[in-house]
Amino acid sequence: MLRVILTALTLTRAGDGLPVKSPTEVGMSSTRLNAIERVVERGIKAGGYPGASVIVGRKGAAVFEKGFGKLSWNESSTTVDAQRTIYDIASLSKVVGTTTAIMILYDENKIRLDDPVVNYIPTFGGGDKDQVTIRQLLTHTSGLPAGRDIWRIAQTPLEARALVLNTPLEGRPGAQYIYSDLGADVLGLLIEVVSGEPLDKFLTRRVFEPLGMNETMYRPADSLRYRIAPTEVTPPRGYPLRGEVHDENAYALGGVAGHAGLFSTAADLSVFAQMMLNGGEYNGVQIISKPTVELFTSRAFGHRALGWDTAEGDYGSGRYLGPTAYGHTGFTGTSMWIDPEREMFVILLTNRVHAARALRPAKVISDVRADLSDAAVLSVLDGPKLTAGSKAFRADREVGWNPPPRASRRRHGSSKHHSIASATSKSRAGSAKKSSASKKKSSKKSH
């Protein structure tokens, strides 16, 4: 059920998320917001993910907050609770964690965006790497490759760190966009050098604790495992993952990395999103200065802002978010989009990497992400008018979610139907080829 609306008070305790208001109080339509339920439930029914947490907020309050489905496909599994269910947020760690820490250090004049990284981490340098700047790491224009199988080589977190820093460039610094997890990892190491403390401790002390985000952490305790949505069932580690970071490189780095590692609830992330909308402040606590928030969330190279991505009508941002909207997605099936023009945000957390039953779970989550943003914007009654265009939801069509097996003809006219396993294998092979090609194109983004 939706969280009870309303109470006489609008204040909440730390860790409870945002205060709750009815949609009409913030200029939204509750009827239109109900489309979110249909969209998310269709994703579950199609086998894209076993459960999800969704929060839509506007003008300082949560107007839609609901948990859908279960933590896993098991019938006896716990139902999802938007307040309590903890998800591995994957690449949302890049913005909620790493970028936020960089913003704080920038505010304190401890770093400058155009400083070469080698000034702070001498072991990162050599050749063109001497020219790589903090700004280029934030915009994914450093020339570092998209990734590297560090987890196959490193025996310890210390070795993994050294491998991150000695990774050779794939392109000339500043010349092209290559979405790079490694760049975020270098930023994480730079934060530790400048702040003098581990990344997780710095963020807990400077961001999560002041905001009351008590359910946001790296390396969650075993005592929280029952509330954590599981991820991979058969990972390279050899055992099902629950409460351990899904990303193999982040695990090799000790569970705390610049590109992944954070676990959180939708309620906690709603507080973070509101802090960003407020210009870096929440409940009287200033985390980041307003000019810095504006700087880091404005386009800096193509569609990329500094650390953040911007809404271009693709990759889960939907068609209707405003021109100043920004956000990010995560590989495990997470996303957060913030629209300053409408004073609104949309948060989706899923574990679509957990034994997805859909043939193309990546297509399912991409469409559901976009539909959520569209449904939220279409619910705004007092905001900017929308441009003309179709208002149909992708989830209602389910195009490409579970394509039927394709028939193949033999030379003499006989035919046979491929099995679902065969179709899945071909789909994965095709996706791998597309993924490889996308890394070489500056216009592509990571999910």
Image (cartoon, rainbow, N blue to C red):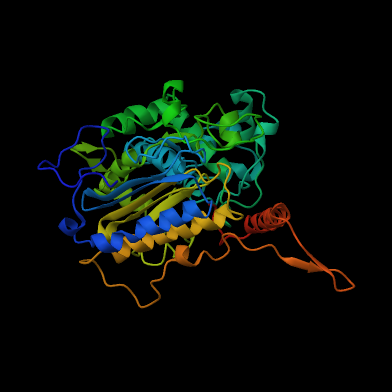
Residue at horizontal 63 percent and vertical 44 percent from the top? 147
**For residue 100, what is the image quadrant?**
top left
Q: Is residue 380 visible?
A: yes
Above or below for 4 versus 175: above
Above or below for 160 versus 140: above
Instruction: Pick the residue in front: 116 or 239.
Output: 239
Instruction: Pick the residue in front: 341 or 47.
Output: 47
Instruction: Pick the residue in front: 415 or 290.
Output: 415
Residue at horizontal 35 percent and vertical 34 percent from the top? 84
Q: Residue furthest left?
A: 8
In the image: residue 241, left or right of residue 205: right
Q: Is residue 324 visible?
A: no
In the image: residue 32, left or right of residue 157: left
Residue 430 percent location from the top left of the image: 69, 58
Residue 433 percent location from the top left of the image: 70, 57
Residue at horizontal 17 percent and vertical 59 percent from the top? 24
**For residue 414, what is the image quadrant?**
bottom right
Residue 336 percent location from the top left of the image: 39, 50
Residue 39 percent location from the top left of the image: 41, 58
Numbered circles on residues, count: 0
Residue at horizontal 42 percent and vertical 66 percent from the top? 393
In the image: residue 75, left or right of residue 161: left
Q: Residue furthest right?
A: 412
